[in-house]
Image (cartoon, rainbow, N blue to C red):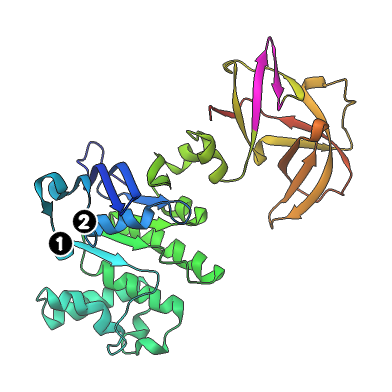
Amino acid sequence: MQTPNSDPLLECRQLRKTFGSHTALDSIELQVHPGECQVLLGPSGCGKTTLLNLIAGSLAADGGTLSIAGTVMDDPARGTHQPMQTRGLAMVFQNHSLWPHMNVEQNVGFGLKLRGTTSSQRRQRVMEILERLQIAEFADRAISTLSGGQQQRVAIARALVVHPRLLLMDEPLSALDARLKEELKSEIALLIRDTGQTVVYVTHDQGEAFALGDRIALMADGRIAQNSTPEAIYQSPSSRFVAEFIGSANILAFERRGDEIVLDNALRLAATNGLPANGHLVVRREDIDLSPGKAPPPDARPNGVLPGSVRHSRFLGDRHEILLDLDQGMRLRAFHRSALACGETVGISLDLQRAHVVRS
């Protein structure tokens, strides 16, 4: 985690990148502080990998500035572009990019060899990082004999052993199966915390983003829609796009009429303090309480309880997701501790105190 009041290690100001007539990145503002893991999250084509390549130096910016540790790396207006090898970075790719003619120890120690580290020092540092990643017993093994998860551990070890000032990770877990992904996700989180390594991590997987990121920058159409802590981006999305992309929320248009609010021009509930005249309510599934078999009649809404029926129940492992039908064709999704039968009537209570309002 960043040191309070520390200067940013990475700073992007109005960063821009185009490919022909296509604007891949537009007006990117980003600061990453020492010891911080900054996640770049978003759908395919949003610009997150392009931004990572600009940071790495494999692409040159077309506008704005990019600085690392206070030194300007890209400033197109002044003709400045520092090459990748001068930036003090290391990178982990999705496809490992290991050298097949070298064994594990040689792969991991290659960067140290280029830096002139003696063979004894190199072996010591290599074995230390292999131990931390639980692959020391594979030091003499050929890369071709390792599983995908083991190869990715080698790639991570190779990046960390040189103590880069900034580690870039480009969807490193996307090619792994679910079990290995969970295992490596936990290991990477511990490594980042224990080493204090500064990281920029690209992913389209929200689980990875929330498990690893000190801050999550959600990107769309070449811009950063919101860059916040995991808690803030989930609980206080800045727009409807962020609310719909992060987690799984019910987005309900509302209009305030006196002491009531009308949801989707159909359902009336007592208004809570602080609600504006109109907008969209973001109601998370966990903020809806269900009372099976206790739906009130349509003309009576005691304590803000709405009548509904179960359309579908889906088991998620630790709970069930319930799809609900309400009046006027309105639908909601909620969590419940057990399965509910299709067609079963329920009372539906929305916790409006926890709902968040977005304007668009």
The percent coordinates of residue 268 (x first, y second) are 75, 21
Q: Is residue 197 left or right of residue 118?
A: right
Residue at x 20% of width, y 81% of height: 123
Residue 60 is tagged as: 2
Identified at 17% across, 78% down, the residue is 122
In the picture provided, is 7 more to the left or to the right than 2?
A: left
Sequence-wise first label, 2 or 1: 2
| Image height of 357 relative to 226, above or below | above
- 327 versus 52 height, above or below: above
Residue furthest out toward the front:
21
* Magenta-span inclusion, residue 220: no
Q: Nearer the viewer, residue 227 or 155?
A: 227
Position of residue 328 measured from the top left corner of the image (x, y, whole percent): 81, 31
Residue that numbered label 1 is attached to: 83
Query: Where does the image place residue 159, in percent across and percent down from the top left?
Result: 27, 69
Residue 258 covered by magenta stretch: yes
CA neighbours of label 2 inside 10 A, class few (<14), some (14 to 19), many (20+): many
Q: Which residues are magenta?
A: 252-264
Q: Secondary structure at mark 2?
A: loop
